[in-house]
Image (cartoon, rainbow, N blue to C red):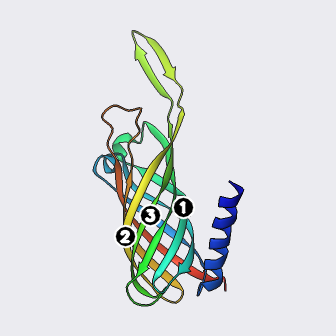
């Protein structure tokens, strides 16, 4: 195991030394829910951060993280108090022109951690009122994304299709899909 860690560390350090510009990106991520996911939420929005390690002439290894607050559809606002998700994904970015410049394609794999807090619910039956306290449910699900974007000297604009695997505990559950829009300011580490 120590040998594997040593080899991987040497590869990463070697790629970093050959890299043109390691970059950190800070920006805003927006999610436009689709399908069944869109039946519950209208929008997700929040801060995002990323890292890119260039390898070769047109390829970059990426890692991205964001925190998105989900806006609940009005039909469910009496039931859902708050909802959020934290996408954590790593992937590859291929530039069609020059390294870290112009149009690119991007593929990512990772996990989406989601949290939903429900409101307290009161029911009256035959003059007796019963209150069910709200609760918070959290889950972590595998996710993937494919997208395109355009990178300028200090700005990265991206559009992607994200798919979050369904919760295996829920019979008949389907994947949650959304279009992601990312606008980020780039900071060179070199």
What whole-number distance in Å separates the C-alpha atoms at marks 1 and 2?
Answer: 16 Å
Q: How crowded is mark 2: few (under 14 residues within 10 Å), some or many (20 or more)?
A: some
Q: Reply above or below: 17 against 38.
A: below
* Rendered residue at 54%/61% (across/down): 66
Quick one: 85 or 105, which is closer to the camera? Answer: 105
Residue contact at pointers 2 and 3, CB within 8 angstroms: yes
Element on which disc 1 rests = strand
Q: Residue 64, position in %: x, y?
A: 54, 65
Looking at this view, name the residue that lies furthest to the front: 3
Q: In the rendering, at what x and y percent does residue 21 appear? A: 60, 85
Write down the residue under mark 2. Answer: 147
Q: In this view, does 151 lie above or below 144?
A: below
Q: Residue at x 46, y 52 (%)?
A: 70
Residue under pointer 1:
66
Q: In this view, does 39 lie to the left or right of 18?
A: left
84 relative position to 105: left or right: right
Image location of residue 49, percent across then percent down = 57, 68
């Amino acid at each position: 195991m120590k040998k594997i860690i040593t080899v991987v560390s040497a590869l990463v350090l070697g790629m970093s030394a050959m890299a043109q510009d390691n970059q950190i990106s800070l920006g805003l991520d927006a999610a436009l829910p689709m399908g069944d996911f869109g039946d519950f939420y209208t929008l997700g929005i929040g801060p995002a951060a990323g890292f890119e390690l260039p390898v070769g002439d047109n390829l970059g290894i990426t890692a991205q993280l964001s925190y998105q607050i989900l806006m609940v559809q009005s039909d469910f606002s009496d039931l859902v108090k708050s909802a959020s998700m934290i996408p954590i994904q790593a992937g590859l970015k291929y530039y069609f022109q020059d390294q870290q410049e112009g149009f690119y394609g991007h593929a990512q794999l990772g996990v989406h951690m989601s949290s939903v807090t429900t409101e307290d619910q009161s029911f009256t039956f035959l003059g007796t009122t019963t209150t069910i306290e709200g609760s918070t449910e959290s889950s972590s699900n595998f996710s993937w994304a494919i997208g395109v974007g355009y990178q300028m000297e200090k700005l990265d604009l991206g559009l992607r299709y994200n798919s979050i695997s369904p919760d295996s505990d829920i019979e008949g559950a389907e994947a949650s899909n959304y279009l992601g829009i990312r606008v980020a300011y780039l900071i060179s580490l070199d």
